[in-house]
Amino acid sequence: MEKVEGATAELERVDYATVEDPISCDAVAFGSPNYFGYMAGLLKDFFDRA
């Protein structure tokens, strides 16, 4: 794994995130459990609002 000097990372739950949060980032990673082949409802709601 490569270390990048000056880089920071934040971990935020999707139910506390705002639609503007990903816009202010250089990179975003989303994770979700797999419920019968689909993502968690909170994450889908976030994508629908975004």
Image (cartoon, rainbow, N blue to C red):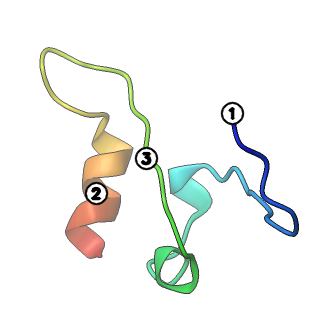
Cβ–Cβ under 8 Å for marks 1 and 3: no
Crowd around label 1: few <14 · some 14–19 · many ≥20 (10 Å): few
Crowd around label 2: few <14 · some 14–19 · many ≥20 (10 Å): few
Q: Position of residue 18 (x, y in %)?
A: 52, 75
Quadrant of the frame with the N terminus: top right
Report the residue at 43% width, 37% height from top.
Answer: 31
Q: Identify the element where label 1 is drawn.
A: loop
Q: Position of residue 15 (x, y in %)?
A: 53, 54
Label 3 amino acid?
Phe
Quadrant of the frame with the C terminus: bottom left
Residue where numbered disc 3 is placed: 30
Number of on-image labels: 3
Q: Nearer the viewer, mark 2 or mark 1?
A: 1
Report the residue at 49% width, 74% height from top.
Answer: 22
| Front position in the image: 33 or 8 | 8
Earlier sequence position, callout 3 versus callout 2: 3
- The image quadrant that residue 35 belongs to is top left
Cβ–Cβ under 8 Å for marks 3 and 2: no
Q: Which mark is residue 47?
A: none
Q: Is residue 8 above or below residue 37?
A: below
Q: Give me the C-alpha separation between circle 2 and circle 1.
A: 32 Å
Residue where numbered disc 1 is placed: 1
Give the residue at the far front of this rendering.
2
Q: Is residue 8 rendered to the left or right of residue 33?
A: right
